[in-house]
Image (cartoon, grey):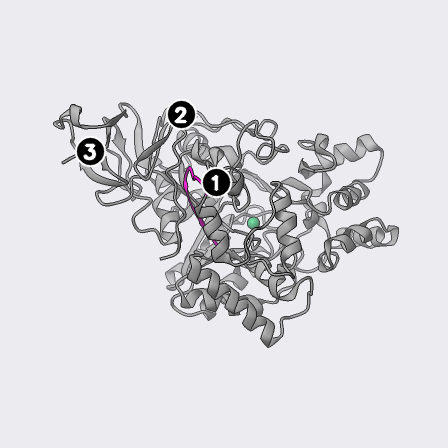
Amino acid sequence: MAFDLIVRGGTLVDGTGVPGRPADVGVAGDRIVAVGDLSGVDPGGVAAWIDATDLVVAPGFVDPHGHSDGTVLVDGALASHLLQGYTTQLSGNCGDTLAPVTDLAREAVEIALAEVGLEPTWRTFGEYLDTVDAMPLGPNVAFLCGHNTLRSAVMGTRHDAPSPADAQAMARLLEEALDAGAIGLSTGLIYPPGIHARPEEVSALVRVAARRGGLYASHIRNESSGLFAALEEALAATRSAGDSARLQVSHLKAADRFVHGRAAEAIGMLEAARAAGLDVGADQYPYTAAATALQTVLPPWLLAVPVDETARALRDRTVRARIRDEIAVGIPGWENAAADPGWDGLVLTASPTHPGWAGRPLADVADDAGCDPLDLACDLLADDGLTTQMTIHCMTEVDVETILAAGWVAVCTDAGGRRPGHPVLDAGVPHPRAYGSAPRVLGRYVRERRVLPLETAVAKLTSVPAARLGLPDRGVVRAGAFADLVVFDAATVADRATFGRPAVPPAGIAAVVVNGAVAARDGVETGARPGRLLRRG
Ligand SMILES: [Zn+2]
């Protein structure tokens, strides 16, 4: 047998969850062709070797929840992810995607792309995928089609319910996206315009996705006091879509004091649905802070108008008085992060007009400016055209570890590809999950805190998410599978990215192989771009 690459002498943790065992891995072309004792192979005939003595050999990590829709077009290497061992990433999450583009959706797509300095050159979802396909890629990438984008494409900034014709038009655009290769549908029900969608609007689209075997990935309507109702809404949409419906609950968490300590209940609710035969999965990033758009502190009615109108309204004192009241009292169903965790728990991470504030708690910046945090937030959002980003320190370690211990919950990054020092891809002071998620699970939670065994953690990073994406030949090391591999040192693997200094790749990742080509060695990219665009089916 001829080999292009042999990874020899390591402990194979194959992604299925079974105990690690000594095994060499032989690769020919883009496939694994042999797993076992390859010590008898004539070394002269093998182009490349990786010595994995004292190291773990695992399938390449699969990120089921990423946001590289725009950044992949700036730099297809996705360095922040590749250097963690990710060999596949699913983007298009949380409802916002960069296609389809219609005249009505153009503004939203243009705003999103402006953050990475680009403009759309495509209209259909298929044309967007073709644009990505033309990029040299580090890891493999795949995409969901977002409900917010579909809604904007058909309804613009309207926030009423879709007419039958609107609903049909959204369904048709989703079908086109799925047929072009989208992995499924995503929703982001805390963001405009999805926040205005009633459950039946979403259910209708979940049925469209289900008919084609597509995944339904949902950033649910509420991860705080309304967590259980929001989970039930996602489950109900999935049940109503028939046997082929498949749900992925995005970045599962218990995000405010009403639900702190109740992660086990959320896990139990989803496990009951799984036991009843529903195809339900979930993912999680291993941190106690979330990250999202600062505009989510605004009450939903304010997110119901075009961006420039919202920005104008935010300068208005009477509008601010109403916001202040609503934050104090709350609105049923609305996540209210300005009240819980409160302004002290919100840290600015990116602002185009005030880049120097990135990394600072919003309350501190307001203190320095001698103003109220809400006034500062309103001014900043208006200045930034609502694009300001933040982290929210809102979870408990106990809940994070409870969710992490569930073997069926995949690990994700919830981040787009970044690159240290890059003028666009290193802007701001983002959440460290972009650089540290996978090694943090392996270092902090497996080795240090012993929350879960290594083999379970590797499965949660590989075969579990690969199954959600519908990739039977990835996420596992066996003869015949694609040669996506990561070699790491279980004794030293660790995240080094922190909230203060996030753009730091991890320690202990010895090699990353994508489709049979070595893409990183000892924390350094080789320059190879072996990744592919993966289309559904
Ligand atoms: Zn999300």
Q: Earlier in the sequence, mark 2 or mark 3?
A: 3
Residue beneath the point at 42% across and 70% down: 242
Image coords of residue 409 (percent x, y): 42, 48
From this viewpoint, is residue 64 visible?
A: no
Viewer-closest of 494 and 421: 421
Residue located beneath label 1 in the image: 401
Q: Which residues are magenta?
A: 135-144
Image coords of residue 308 (percent x, y): 76, 53
Please report contact status of discs 1 and 3: CB closer than 8 Å, yes or no: no
Please report contact status of discs 2 and 1: CB closer than 8 Å, yes or no: no
Q: Earlier in the sequence, mark 2 or mark 1?
A: 1
Q: Amino acid at mark 1?
A: Glu
Decide: few, some or many residues near mark 3? Use Cα within 10 Å; few <14, some 14-19, many ≥20.
many
Q: Amino acid at mark 3?
A: Phe
Residue beneath the point at 36% across and 52% down: 467
Rendering quarter of residue 164: bottom right
In the rendered structure, find residue 508 and report the number of the disc placed on it: 2
Q: Earlier in the sequence, mark 1 or mark 3?
A: 3
In the rendered structure, find residue 3 and report the number of the disc placed on it: 3
